[in-house]
């Protein structure tokens, strides 16, 4: 195939928010959906494993040589907003804070909460990102995908996607998200929406460790409980393994305080799980996506 651009042996630690990750055998950052599709077709035709990463948040990549092609979507930034109809079409790499501010400026309501999530539209759909009872799935109309096995490209209406807490079927099927169509309530008060968006960001930055490399939340909240509360009650804030540390600001965050590697972080996740299970009888499920650990 012509015009396939990728680099070799790229450090993935430069593309994750926790600044950890091994080497990608092949690596590419497409600028649009067409280039993205070409890369996926190339990986299929050349029988290469294909990993997709977005902003690299909520992602732990093992410190290994990761075979195959890793595609980073963060430059797929095309977004079209219709302020009259409330219809928004966004490529997978559009950053949620960028979209949140654009929605507010166009008087569209319902995306103010996403301003504090350092992820992409594709990642948010894949992980079913949420805050309280708000999630992007509620605004979703359809998702454009490519089947990595058959290379068929098609749209899936929201009614055919079984979203659950911090879960979407895209975590288990062969479909890769290209873009999404969403609806946000139009004709809102722009000034009020911008102020709410600003306050939401301020609240996030004051309660979460944005000044250090981290994932975002490590664990899913158990039913009728909060992972951060359980971890804090056991006095685990500040617990360190190597360069990985439980944040002293928010217990459901692990930060890379210095030179953490993937094993430090995985070991710390395991220790937290064991302690909470022993003392509270609750097994904390990670919400962090892990890549490359099957090979270790």
Image (cartoon, rainbow, N blue to C red):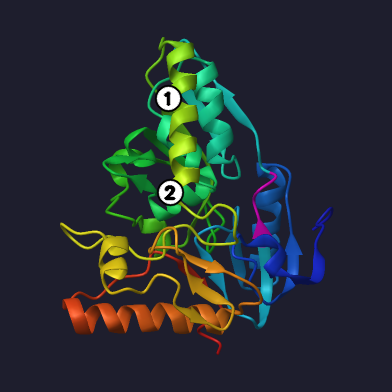
Dot 2 crowding, Cα within 10 Å, few <14, some 14–19, many 20+: few
Q: Name which residue lies at 46% across and 84% down.
A: 267
Q: Quadrant of residue 296?
A: bottom right
The part of the chain drawn in magenta is: 71-75
Does the segment drawn in magenta span residue 255? no
* Left or right: residue 163 compared with residue 267: left
Q: Residue furthest bottom?
A: 296
Q: Name which residue lies at 54% across and 57% down.
A: 57
Q: Position of residue 177 (x, y in %)?
A: 51, 49
Q: Secondary structure at mark 1?
A: helix
Q: Nearer the viewer, residue 202 or 283?
A: 202
Q: Label 2 belongs to which residue? A: 207
Tag of residue 196: 1
Q: Is residue 288 above or below residue 142?
A: below
Report the predominant secondary structure element of the magenta stretch. Answer: loop
Q: Position of residue 35 (x, y in %)?
A: 72, 48
Dot 1 crowding, Cα within 10 Å, few <14, some 14–19, many 20+: some
Tag of residue 15: none
- Compute the Cα span from label 1 to label 2: 17 Å
Q: Nearer the viewer, residue 124 or 213?
A: 213
Which numbered disc, 1 or 2, marks the residue that appears first in the sequence? 1
Q: Is residue 26 above or below residue 168?
A: below
* Left or right: residue 225 compared with residue 118: left
Q: Quadrant of residue 49?
A: bottom right
């Amino acid at each position: 195939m012509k015009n396939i651009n990728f680099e070799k042996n790229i450090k993935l630690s430069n593309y994750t928010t926790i600044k950890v990750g091994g080497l990608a055998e092949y690596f590419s950052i497409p600028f649009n959906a067409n280039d993205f599709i070409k890369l996926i077709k190339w990986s299929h035709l050349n029988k290469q494993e294909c990993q997709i990463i977005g902003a690299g948040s909520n992602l732990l990549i093992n410190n290994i040589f990761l075979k195959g092609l890793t595609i980073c979507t963060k430059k797929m930034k095309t977004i079209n907003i219709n302020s009259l109809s409330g219809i928004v079409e966004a490529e997978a790499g559009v950053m949620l804070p960028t979209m949140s501010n654009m929605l507010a400026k166009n008087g569209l309501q319902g995306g103010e909460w996403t301003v504090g999530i350092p992820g992409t539209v594709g990642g948010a759909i894949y992980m079913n990102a949420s805050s309280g009872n708000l999630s992007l799935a509620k605004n979703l109309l359809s998702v454009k995908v490519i089947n990595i096995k058959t290379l068929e490209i098609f749209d899936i209406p929201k009614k055919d996607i079984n979203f659950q807490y911090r879960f979407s079927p895209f975590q288990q099927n062969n479909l890769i998200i290209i873009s999404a169509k969403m609806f946000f309530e139009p004709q809102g008060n722009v000034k009020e929406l911008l102020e709410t968006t600003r306050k939401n960001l301020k609240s996030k930055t004051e309660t979460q460790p944005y000044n250090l490399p981290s994932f975002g939340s490590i664990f899913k909240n158990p039913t009728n409980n909060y992972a951060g509360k359980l971890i804090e009650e056991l006095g685990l804030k500040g617990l360190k393994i190597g360069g990985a540390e439980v944040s002293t600001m928010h217990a459901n965050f692990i930060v890379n305080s210095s030179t953490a590697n993937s094993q430090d972080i995985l070991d710390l996740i395991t220790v937290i799980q064991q302690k909470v299970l022993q003392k509270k009888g609750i097994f904390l499920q990670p919400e962090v996506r892990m890549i490359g650990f099957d090979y270790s």
